[in-house]
Image (cartoon, rainbow, N blue to C red):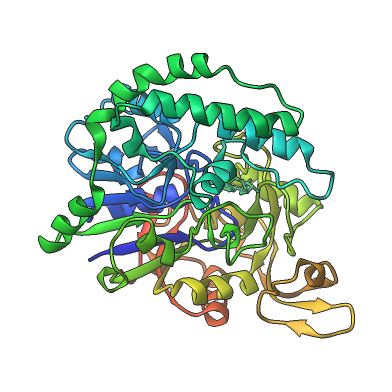
């Protein structure tokens, strides 16, 4: 069974926890896009693990973990994370693999990311994570990027010098400090040695696993509404976190994918700038932030919070072909006397959108249309079986399923591994 797991909103849906849960049945876990802008949190016992680049499958001994060709990997972030994973007691040797085709995020990409963001006028800032993601993908698409395989080449350090010289021209144009090419060479020399053992042809590796009928889990980072094609452009990340990205970012063909699981938080959050139709600026928003611990796992920024948006979820269902939903953070809603679902966007002239408009100017003219349901006002985090859920909770979940399509597969009622209910999968 090969599974693609994707975020269905603006990220931070709780993908790390669901991936950790699904990894028990997988042999290989693959990251296929994004970089260290991601922050996947997994809670095991009283320990909280946050992973940015290394697939969450690493927390299960013996599972293989792959950084696919679609990822942009910052070697320093990766080295730091690998050291951390080993310090937690997980062995990496022989089970961690980096695609030689993946691109690298270099120090100058980070510097350009920050300088570009600073240069954007108010209202045009994207609120990037500052991890160099956009400039690294721009270099890839512009065909002047640096691939992981380049570290195996004898002229790697000359390539570093040439790229720094080029980047310094861009930094000067942005009014930012230049980087010293020789310092960069010094910085990258030990890295080459440290990462070389993990670099391999991951396409070959994945196809051997397919031939042996092993189970592969594709771990999406970020989410549908941050997708460079399908998200709220330009307030998006620079990759394809949607299901199609699993194929282009790993070298596994579409026919090899058996199912798609979408992760859906039972309310909505967004971090960074950009439109967010159901955003709350009142006490309810504050309650969601506090009860949900809604602060970025990568940047620590407070997340913007709002009611569940069925327009977004339905759009995500279509774009990804979601078979099963993993619904998360149910318990965060436990105290609300009323819970709301956005079923459409009403434009100022009365027209109601039921699909997500491409034009952000249109969104600005819209207000959400809400359906109100009674809350359940009791604790759900101890519940271990779907049938034990309060009737009002089931009504809320079922109404969402009616509106968005797809089946319920997993329901998460708390942060710990044990608080995950398996429904139909
Ligand atoms: P970038 O990916 O750092 O270029 O940031 C682009 C946008 O995507 C910003 O609004 C970020 O806050 C958002 N973003 C990037 N990665 C994540 C993530 O893992 N979770 C939530 N938002 C993210």
Q: Position of residue 284 (x, y in %)?
A: 75, 54
Left or right of 279? Residue 27 is left
Left or right of 91? Residue 250 is right
Q: Position of residue 341 (x, y in %)?
A: 67, 71
Q: Position of residue 293 (x, y in %)?
A: 60, 41
Between 301 and 134, the one nearer to me in the picture: 134
Left or right of 86? Residue 372 is right
Residue at (64% x, 74% y) in the render: 311
Q: Quadrant of the C terminus?
A: bottom left
Q: Quadrant of the N terminus?
A: bottom left
Whether residue 314 is situated above or below residue 133 in the rendered picture: below
Total numbered badges shown on the rendered structure:
0
Q: Is residue 248 visible?
A: yes
Residue at (40% x, 23% y) in the render: 157
Left or right of 198? Residue 260 is right
Residue at (83% x, 66% y) in the render: 364
Residue at (41% x, 21% y) in the render: 188
Between 339 and 403, the one nearer to me in the picture: 403
């Amino acid at each position: 069974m090969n599974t693609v797991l994707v975020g269905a909103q603006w990220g931070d849906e709780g993908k790390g926890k669901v991936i950790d849960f699904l990894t028990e049945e997988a042999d290989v876990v693959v990251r296929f896009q994004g970089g260290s802008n991601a922050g996947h949190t997994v809670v095991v016992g009283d320990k909280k693990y946050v992973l940015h680049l290394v697939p969450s499958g690493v927390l299960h001994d013996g599972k293989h973990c792959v950084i696919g060709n679609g990822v942009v990997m910052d070697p320093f972030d990766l080295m730091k994370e690998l050291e951390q994973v080993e310090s937690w007691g997980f062995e990496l040797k022989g089970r961690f693999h980096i695609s030689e085709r993946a691109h690298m995020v270099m120090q100058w990409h980070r510097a350009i990311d920050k300088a570009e963001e600073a240069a954007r006028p108010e209202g045009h800032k994207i609120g990037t994570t500052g991890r160099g993601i956009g400039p690294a993908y721009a270099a890839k698409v512009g065909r002047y990027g640096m691939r992981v395989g380049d570290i195996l080449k004898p002229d790697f350090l000359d390539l570093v010098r040439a790229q720094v010289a080029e980047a310094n021209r861009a930094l000067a144009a942005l009014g930012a400090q230049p980087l010293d090419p020789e310092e960069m060479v010094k910085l990258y020399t030990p890295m080459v040695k440290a990462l070389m053992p993990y670099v391999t042809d991951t396409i070959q590796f994945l196809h051997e696993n397919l031939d042996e009928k092993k189970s592969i889990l594709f771990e999406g980072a970020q989410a549908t509404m941050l997708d460079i094609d399908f998200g709220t452009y330009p307030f998006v990340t620079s990759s394809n976190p949607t299901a199609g990205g699993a194929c282009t970012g790993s070298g596994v063909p579409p026919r090899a994918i058996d199912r798609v699981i979408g992760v859906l938080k039972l309310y909505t959050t967004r971090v960074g700038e950009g439109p967010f139709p159901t955003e709350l600026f009142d006490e309810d928003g504050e309650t969601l932030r506090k009860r949900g611990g809604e602060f970025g796992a990568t940047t620590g920024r407070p997340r913007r919070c709002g009611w569940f948006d069925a327009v977004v979820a339905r759009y995500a269902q279509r774009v990804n072909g979601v078979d099963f939903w993993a619904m998360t953070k149910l318990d965060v809603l436990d105290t609300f006397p009323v819970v709301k679902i956005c079923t459409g966007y009403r434009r100022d002239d009365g027209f109601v959108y039921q699909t997500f408009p491409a034009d952000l100017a249109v969104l600005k003219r819209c207000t959400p249309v809400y359906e109100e349901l009674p809350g359940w006002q009791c604790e759900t985090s101890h519940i271990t079986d779907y049938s034990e859920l309060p009737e009002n909770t089931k009504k809320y979940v079922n109404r969402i399923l009616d509106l968005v399509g797809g089946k319920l597969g997993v329901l998460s009622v708390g942060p710990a591994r044990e608080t995950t209910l398996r429904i139909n999968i």
